[in-house]
Amino acid sequence: MKSTEIIDLHKKYVMPTYAPGLVLVKGNGSKVWDADGKEYLDFLAGIAVLNVGHCHAAVVKAVQEQAGKLVHVSNLYYNENQPQLAQALAERSMGGKCFFCNSGAEANEGLIKLARLWGSAKGKYEVITMKNSFHGRTLATLTATGQDVYINDEKFELGRNFCTKIWNAARFMQMNATGEVINPDGIDFSKMTLSPDDQHILAKLGEAVRNTEDNLARHRFNDA
């Protein structure tokens, strides 16, 4: 099928919850090709899903082997791969246990629930997110999304009211390119007790913001 045919079919049968640009049909490493044979460099990697590149030989082999053995059994049964993956993630990160879910929105919903479960007895219930962030398309994660279209648009008022009753909505802050926190919602940080881990995470976040800005400054694309 050609790009125009695929786009027409998509518009006819798929809900317009996203605004895709290209019609991609294959990939290899950091390159992808559209339905008309044009080649592109993929800087998105499936939104950080394909960090080893498209069609990596080891990944293709593992998927083929597993598909020939067992494809899906749901969470109603144990399987050998899930705990092994959880162990590998825990040993390479902060330890603890893993929560496997289907999307970033579900992961953030789980985070909100766990945070409020931990904080409720301490009177800590507000959720603070970043301005211009995006946290998912569920009611709770849209309320936590710091974009004007979701904060002010009347189309989302019902969802906001629903979530406000559940978890008192979100508070928003932002960080500039130097790592300095800007506080447009007037959040009283003096009443918050940050653990050494929290302070370390905030410091790393500021460092990442500064590094990103430095890299962008060094690699600006010239329109000419």
Image (cartoon, grey):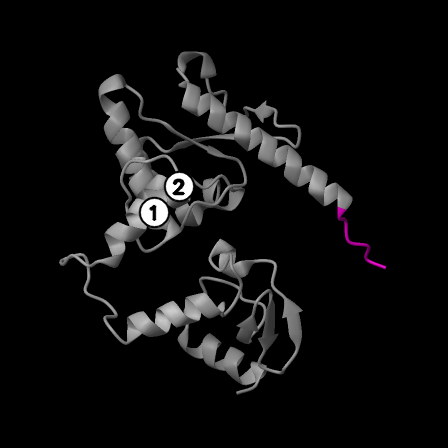
Q: Element under label 2?
A: loop
Residue at 30% in and 73% down: 67
Residue underneath mark 2: 92
Q: Which residues are magenta?
A: 219-224
Q: Amino acid at mark 1?
A: Ala
| Mark number, residue 88 | 1
For this view, does 138 lie left or right of residue 78? Answer: right
Is the stretch drawn in magenta largely helix, strand or loop?
loop
Is 5 situated above or below 123?
below
Q: Is residue 159 visible?
A: no
Badge 1, how many Cα within 10 Å: few under 14, some, many 20+? few
Is 173 situated above or below 65?
above
Q: Residue furthest top?
A: 190
Residue at 51% in and 59% down: 52
Q: Residue furthest bottom?
A: 1
Quick one: quadrant of the C terminus? bottom right
Q: Residue furthest right?
A: 224
Is 16 situated above or below 84?
below
